[in-house]
Image (spheres, helix red, strand yellow):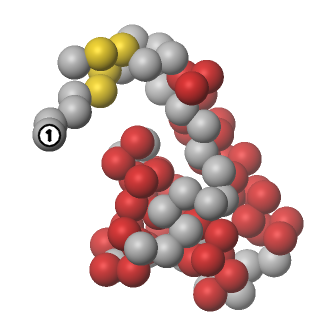
Amino acid sequence: MRTREKSKRIIHGGMRVGEIVTLLPEAASLLAEYGLHCSGCVMGGMETLEDGCQIHGFSQEDTDDLLSDLHTLLQSQSPFSQELTIT
């Protein structure tokens, strides 16, 4: 296990939805609030957040709002959270 600084954990529109949910499991419910149920969808592992937003008819402003809310959620996480990587 290793501790990772929050500043290194940046979420962006080019990330796959599955990566976002792996990084920030709480994001699944936030995505669902926006109407994106991608975390439970097979496409969530393959499409980027921007792709998912576009497919679901989001405007650029909606996508930016979602990214802002994801960053707020990420910043609310404990700086002492740990990441376990199994290879």
Residue ID for mark 1: 87
Instruction: Kindly identify the residue that appears in the image at 29 percent across and 27 percent down.
Output: 83
Q: In the image shown, does 3 or 26 lie closer to the viewer?
A: 3
Residue 14 in view here: yes
Instruction: Kindly identify the residue that appears in the image at 55 percent across and 68 percent down.
Output: 48
- Residue 59: image location, x then y, percent: 81, 77
Three-letter amino acid code at disc 1? Answer: Thr
- Residue 74: image location, x then y, percent: 55, 34
Q: In the image shown, does 26 or 44 lie closer to the viewer?
A: 44
Is residue 31 left or right of 83 when viewed as pictured? right
Quadrant housing the C terminus: top left
- How many discs mark residues in the rendered view? 1
Q: Which of the 4 quarters of the picture holds residue 1?
A: top left
Residue 76 in view here: no
Is residue 42 left or right of 11 when viewed as pictured? left
| 58 over 11 or under it: above or below | below
| 83 over 36 or under it: above or below | above
- Residue 70: image location, x then y, percent: 60, 47
Residue with the most extreme left position: 87
